[in-house]
Structure formats: structure tokens, C-alpha cells
Amino acid sequence: MSVGTPIERIWPAPVTGALTDPQLTALYGRTTGPHLRVNFVASADGAVTLDGYSAGLSGEPDKRVFGLLRMLCDGLVVAAGTLRHEHYRAVRLSPERRAWRREQGLAEFPTLVVVSGSLDLDPAQAAFADAPVRPVVLTHADALPPPGLTDVADVVRCGTGRADESGRAGRVDLVAGLAELRRRGLNQLLCEGGPHLFGALTAADLVDELCLTVAPLLAGAGPGRITAGDASVPRHLPLRHVLAAADGVLMLRYARDLAETPPAGSAPAA
């Protein structure tokens, strides 16, 4: 059953009537092979935050899809800065969504994956201390974990801490990191940001899909975009569907063709 603010599909083939959770699940779905989906919310004028936080842009329809995307993934990827700033809690699901995962032969909960070059992480944060599944932290070879972090998370080193050509040190090799996640069986990945991690994933051509919620408001000058970091080659990402909620929120899904294979390569992330 659908609950709360109705969500309808308006493109490519309009569907009259509110979409149920099973219908939304089918629209977003899971792929048969490795897949990296990125999920963001932004204002109509492109702001990634309101008063410093993404929560100010998100309403009930966005949170509903947000929860379904978490249900669909094997691993939930987030940058350490976003984890700290947005005060992430343990990744847990409702009993109904956990039951759906069991029916699909999936682990009951997705695995939290944190990308951190500095390992400035608090093992006591609920995202670690209360996690139903042991989280994974992707970092580089020279990063030093704080006391207690290895007690609550697997620290995986991808790349070195040596300075690159621009003089920046402490970079995580995202290509190697995602390969390790997939070796662990985390094939369907959902990234919730932040903008610098999204920018680095785009530069490495690792993004297969973008789910973008557009809030019907103007945030004005100040906030950044959903992507940040170094400039990269533009990537074509076809539009797959447009959903609209009764409160004026749009939910856009862009995804590359399943037949497309990103070229091999490596790009660092902060």
C-alpha cells in the first residue's frame, strides 16, 4: 500500500493513481550485475543543503524513496564528512523491509561503507557502535585509525598516502575500494554523498545511476551543488523515469544502459 503523500509516475508512461511501495520497488529495482547508485536531494535552484543540512530539503515522499533505496542495496556508501555532519545513526530497516530482503535471499541489513582519507571517525558514533552489521571503512595505506575503530569496523586500505601530482596526500583509490566491496559480495551499492565523494566517483566513471529529488523551493545563494571537487569529463546518463508527489516534489532517475561497461581506471577521493 502507498502511504502519506501520493507519488505518481508522469514520464515516460504516465501512471494514474498513487504508486504503492511494491510498484516503487519495481521501478527502482536491482540489477543483475555490479551497480553503483547515487542518491541526492537538491532545491530547484541547485542547492544541496538548507541551513547547512540536507534534511531541510527532504520531505515525506523523498524519505519514502530514500528508505526503499536502502532496502534495495547491499552496501550503503557515505563519505566520512557526511557521516559526521549529518549525524548518521546505525543503518536499520523496518520489519517489513527486512522481510522483503530475506525473501530476496539478501542479508537482513545492508552494510555501511565509510570512505575516509583521514580516519577522523568516532567509534562511539551510533553508525558504528549500534550497527547491526559490521561496517567497512575504506581508507589509504598510511592512515592511522583512532583507538577502538578496528573493534567496530573493518578497515580496508586502498591506495597510498603519498602525495599525487597536485601535492595532495591521503587519497583513497575508489576503483580498488569498490572492487574489494564486490569481492565481499556487496554488488549493489548506494552512495548518499557527500558532494566530494560524488565528484570523485564521477571522475572515475564509477557512477551507474543518479536518483535526484528536486524540492520545490529556492534556497538562494550560498549552498554548494550535489557534486564537488576536481573537474572531470562530462558523462551522459539517460533519464529513465520522472515521479511527482502531490506536494510538488520531483524524483528523477538517471541510469546508464546495462550494456555499458565503464573503462578501467583509478581516481582518488578525499
Image (cartoon, rainbow, N blue to C red):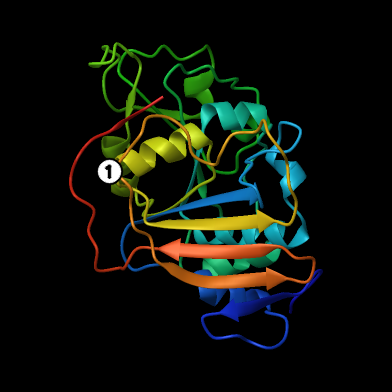
The residue that appears at 19% across and 40% down in the rendered structure is 265
Q: Give the residue number, with chain letter if any, for mark 1.
A: 179
* Residue 248, percent from left and from top: 75, 65
Q: Is residue 247 left or right of residue 266?
A: right
**Residue type at the position of mark 1:** Ala
The residue that appears at 42% across and 58% down in the rendered structure is 209
Based on the displayed image, in which of its 4 quarters is residue 223 positioned?
A: top right
* Residue 121, percent from left and from top: 55, 20
The residue that appears at 60% across and 31% down in the rendered structure is 83
Q: Which quarter of the figure is the N terminus placed in?
A: bottom right
Based on the displayed image, in which of its 4 quarters is residue 245 positioned?
A: bottom right
The residue that appears at 60% across and 85% down in the rendered structure is 14
Q: Is residue 93 left or right of residue 110?
A: right
* Residue 118, percent from left and from top: 45, 16
Q: How many marks?
A: 1
Q: Which quarter of the figure is the C terminus placed in?
A: top left
Pick the residue in front: 178 or 147: 178
Based on the displayed image, in which of its 4 quarters is residue 157 positioned?
A: top left
Residue 29 visible somewhere in the drawing: no
266 up-or-down from 2: above or below? above
Most distant residue in the bottom direction? 16
Dot 1 crowding, Cα within 10 Å, few <14, some 14–19, many 20+: some
203 up-or-down from 37: above or below? above
Pick the residue in front: 43 or 187: 43
* Residue 24, percent from left and from top: 60, 73
Circle 1 SS class: helix
Pick the residue in front: 187 or 255: 255
Residue 83 visible somewhere in the drawing: yes
Pick the residue in front: 258 or 52: 52
14 up-or-down from 111: above or below? below
